[in-house]
Image: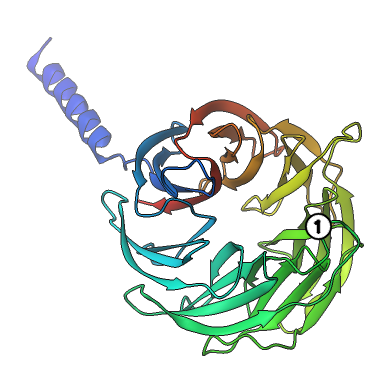
């Protein structure tokens, strides 16, 4: 090898090393998992998630809470909020380690807290109480501390199922635009939209009140990222209802209703969670009993195709999340104490099981936070 050839080879080698060292590090996320089981030793479990290799690695347990029903993370990724039977809790998040440090708590007035979310302006917490059929708002201070309760609304009514003898508010979530907050009530078979003021007060008179078919039991809902549509999961019958909505008027009219259970399944079931892919092409919903994830395509008018089904990879899929890369689905199988990881075909929407992680808690809510 002459000197010129040697120099050229050395330059190519050095350039290759330089390019390798300049490659961006793969995205990584903290994953927080809640547990609300009598046998749990900790209410929040923490994992490291890397979409590049689809690996979920356990990091630790938060021992300051023993049970946690649901979680919410603010848009700054600095604070995590949780609920349990004793109150509403706030934590600061250490960005390098993901470790949670308690900030403060507020005692509940409502009973059976089951859902927590954050207002669009990030200044208020919103809580749904299944047991007492109420929803409430709390202030959030700039340092993440939870303020006192601002407003509370109690629902009234009942429906036809044995679990519908009284109201059961199950979810409260802000609309993607405007000043409306949507609430599902399993006990009264209603989806309600309330105005929320700049001061965080819920107006007691809803803008829209939409009734589901008697006995459906609305549980969770999700908004389409591009269409003026939302989708409501019926826990008691295993249906998904599609509606049009307006930022000022709330739900305006129905679009479609489909079953998310296999036709041959006749046993006990409680549908649990619902999410859409980031591109709005596919809807996913979980079934506790059938232990499946239903997958439905979304048509340009917002209507739904007949679903296909994937095993949830465990028992009692209480919740699941589509990861921020939109390429994986993580399913919290509560009764088998496991999180199943599925790779998502972005063209067909179908799921392929890749691995399952046993958990120290009975998982029931999953939240991602980018490192």
Which residue shows up at 82% across the image and 69% down it? 188
Q: Which residue is mark 1?
A: 163
Q: Looking at the image, which residue sits at the far top?
A: 1
Q: Position of residue 77 (x, y in %)?
A: 38, 62
Front-most of residues 11 and 85 = 85
Front-most of residues 292 and 354 = 292
Quadrant in which the N terminus appears: top left
Which residue shows up at 54% across the image and 33% down it? 338
From the viewer's perspective, tell me whether residue 115 is left or right of residue 1: right
**Eyeballing the image, is 47 above or below 244?**
above
Quadrant assignment, res 159: bottom right
Disc 1: CA contacts within 10 A as few (<14), some (14-19) or many (>=20): some
Judging from the image, what secondary structure is the residue with disc 1 in?
A: loop
Colouring convention used in this rendered image of the protein: rainbow
Quadrant assignment, res 266: top right
Which residue shows up at 76% across the image and 69% down it? 167
From the viewer's perspective, tell me whether residue 344 is left or right of residue 97: right
**Eyeballing the image, is 367 above or below 254?**
above
Q: Position of residue 205 (x, y in %)?
A: 74, 88
């Amino acid at each position: 090898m002459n000197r010129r050839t040697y120099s050229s080879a050395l330059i190519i080698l050095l350039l290759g090393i330089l390019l390798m060292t300049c490659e961006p590090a793969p995205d990584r996320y903290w994953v927080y998992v809640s547990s609300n089981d009598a046998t749990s030793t900790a209410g929040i479990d923490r994992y490291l998630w890397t979409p590049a290799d689809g690996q979920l690695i356990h990091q630790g347990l938060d021992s300051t809470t023993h049970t946690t029903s649901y979680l919410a993370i603010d848009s700054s990724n600095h604070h995590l909020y949780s609920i349990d039977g004793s109150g509403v809790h706030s934590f600061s998040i250490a960005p390098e380690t993901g470790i949670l440090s308690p900030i403060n708590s507020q005692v509940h007035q409502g009973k059976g807290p089951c859902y927590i979310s954050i207002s669009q302006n990030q200044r208020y917490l919103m809580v749904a109480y299944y047991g007492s059929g109420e929803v409430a708002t709390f202030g959030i201070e700039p340092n993440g501390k939870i303020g006192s309760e601002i407003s509370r609304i109690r629902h009234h009514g009942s429906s036809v199922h044995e679990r519908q003898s009284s109201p059961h508010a199950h979810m409260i979530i802000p609309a993607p635009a405007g000043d409306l907050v949507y609430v599902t009530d399993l006990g009264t078979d209603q989806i309600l939209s309330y105005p929320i003021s700049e001061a965080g007060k819920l107006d007691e008179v809803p803008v829209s009140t939409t009734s589901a078919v008697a006995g459906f039991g609305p549980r969770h809902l999700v908004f389409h990222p591009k269409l003026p549509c939302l989708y409501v999961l019926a826990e008691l019958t295993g249906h998904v209802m599609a509606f049009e909505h307006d930022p000022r008027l709330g739900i305006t009219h129905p679009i479609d209703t489909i079953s998310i259970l296999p036709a041959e399944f006749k046993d006990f079931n409680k549908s649990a969670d619902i999410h859409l892919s980031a591109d709005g092409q596919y809807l996913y919903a979980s079934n506790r009993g059938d232990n499946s994830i239903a997958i439905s395509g979304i048509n340009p008018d917002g209507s739904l195709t007949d679903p296909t089904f994937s095993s949830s990879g465990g028992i009692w899929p209480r919740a699941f999340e589509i990861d921020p890369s939109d390429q994986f689905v993580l399913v919290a199988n509560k009764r088998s104490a496991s999180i199943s990881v599925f790779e998502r075909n972005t063209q067909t929407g179908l799921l392929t099981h890749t691995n399952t992680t046993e958990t120290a808690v009975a998982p029931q809510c999953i939240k991602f936070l980018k490192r």
